[in-house]
Image (spheres, rainbow, N blue to C red):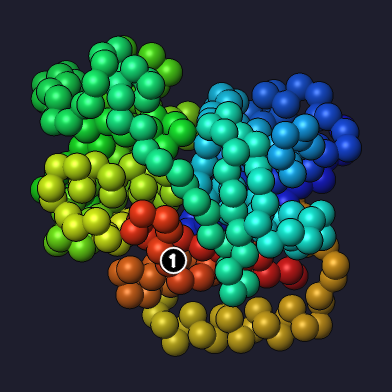
């Protein structure tokens, strides 16, 4: 089966977009699991399936790399919106996208993508967990450790935990154990947070069905909500994330030179469609550059990141702009 796809990312949270508006993709779970392998497939955190909708402009089905379908993805819907505009599937500056979490509305602002993430859900049964009411600093025993958890839903479940040193915390040890704990009937995303100041928190995230990822839009919002509920931060807070240590970093001068090269290549090779061939794997062609902590992002041959923006409610999220080859 021949399958066209586009590889995209928002702050390193990477996706493939599959266009199924005109034709369904048979065996989608099997296809997603096969393509998700970072050594023998394409590699991604989530697959975004673009479909038609009877109650919105489009529908977005989201599958984690393990093949499980999930409700919502903040970075994913920004990338999907940019894909729609880049491929001229809609002229609307604000889109209505149907998801399992409801209708989500990304919009274009000065060439960037902004998303109204909606109101957080705080009732335990609706997140869902096995208890009712708001869950703040509730003890949760995981093997030899007891965590105080705060739970929030942004259309998908999040368990927020505060630690003293998030950079050196054992995310890969405790993340998968909390994800599948029986306290969460549909599993959960897990955010490990270090409070830097009243205006800044640092986050690492273990995503349900995907493992530790470089960014999570709904996770950043859930962490901001939890921090405000607990009185640890002001209502306007910047969420920064830790890059995984295996990635190589470069200085800002190298970043500028790289962007100039990309722009020259883009002028010479610009086409109406973004092309991606199998050898352009993210592991080979993604480069990480150091930037001010609030403005860290990836630059690659396919995508160019952009500065954070302030979403509704004072949350700061990331933005991404598609750069054709």
Say which residue appears at 36% left-offset and 32% top-offset.
Answer: 121
Apparent side of residue 151 relative to residue 115 in the rendered image (left or right): left
Which quadrant is home to the C terminus? bottom right
Which quadrant is home to the N terminus? top right
Apparent side of residue 203 relative to residue 44 in the rendered image (left or right): left
Pick the residue in front: 137 or 266. 137
Q: For residue 28, which quarter of the picture?
A: top right
User: How far across and how far down the image is residue 298, in percent?
Assistant: 49, 65
User: How far across and how far down the image is residue 75, in percent?
Assistant: 52, 50
In the displayed structure, 218 sits above or below 78; it is: above
In the displayed structure, 297 sits above or below 42; it is: below
User: How far across and how far down the image is residue 301, in percent?
Assistant: 64, 68
Pick the residue in front: 77 or 298. 77
The residue tagged with tag 1: helix, strand or loop? strand
Apparent side of residue 215 relative to residue 271 in the rendered image (left or right): left
Q: For residue 129, which quarter of the picture?
A: top left
In the displayed structure, 151 sits above or below 281; it is: above
Q: Residues within 10 Å of mark 1 (few under 14, many from 20)?
A: some
User: How far across and how far down the image is residue 262, in percent?
Assistant: 65, 79
Say which residue appears at 33% left-offset and 42% top-offset.
Answer: 222
Q: For residue 179, which quarter of the picture?
A: top left
Say which residue appears at 59% left-offset and 74% top-offset.
Answer: 110
Query: In this figure, what is the number of numbered marks?
Result: 1
Residue 279 in view in this figure: no
Say which residue appears at 22% left-offset and 52% top-offset.
Answer: 167
Pick the residue in front: 125 or 289. 125
Residue 253 in view in this figure: yes
State the residue position of label 1: 309
Apparent side of residue 309 relative to residue 82 in the rendered image (left or right): left
Pick the residue in front: 67 or 109. 109
């Amino acid at each position: 089966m021949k399958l066209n796809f586009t590889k995209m990312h928002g702050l390193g949270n990477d996706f493939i977009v599959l266009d199924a508006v005109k034709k369904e993709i048979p065996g989608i779970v099997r296809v997603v699991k096969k393509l998700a392998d970072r050594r023998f497939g394409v590699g991604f955190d989530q697959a975004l399936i673009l479909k038609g909708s009877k109650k919105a402009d489009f529908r977005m089905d989201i599958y984690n790399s393990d093949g499980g379908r999930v409700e919502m993805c903040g970075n994913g819907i920004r990338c999907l919106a940019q894909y729609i505009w880049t491929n001229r599937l809609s002229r609307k500056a604000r889109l209505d996208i149907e998801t399992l979490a409801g209708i989500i509305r990304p919009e274009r602002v000065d060439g960037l993508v902004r998303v109204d993430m909606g109101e957080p859900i705080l009732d335990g049964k609706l997140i869902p967990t096995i208890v009712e009411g708001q869950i703040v600093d509730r003890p949760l025993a995981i093997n030899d450790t007891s965590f105080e958890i705060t739970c929030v839903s942004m259309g998908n479940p999040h368990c927020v935990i505060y630690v003293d040193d998030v950079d050196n915390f054992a995310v890969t040890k405790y993340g998968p154990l909390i994800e599948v704990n029986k306290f969460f009937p549909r599993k959960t995303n897990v955010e490990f947070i270090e409070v830097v100041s009243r205006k800044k928190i640092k986050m690492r995230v273990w995503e349900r069905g995907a493992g530790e990822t470089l960014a999570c839009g709904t996770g950043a919002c859930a962490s901001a909500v939890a921090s405000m509920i607990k009185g640890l931060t002001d209502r306007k807070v910047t969420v920064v994330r830790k890059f995984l240590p295996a990635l190589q970093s470069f200085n800002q001068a190298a970043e500028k030179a790289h962007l100039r090269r990309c722009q020259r290549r883009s002028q010479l090779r610009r086409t109406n469609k973004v092309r991606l061939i199998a050898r352009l794997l993210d592991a080979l062609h993604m480069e990480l550059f150091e930037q001010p902590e609030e403005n860290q992002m990836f630059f690659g041959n396919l995508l160019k990141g952009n500065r954070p923006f302030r979403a509704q409610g004072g949350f700061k999220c990331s933005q991404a702009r598609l750069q054709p080859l």
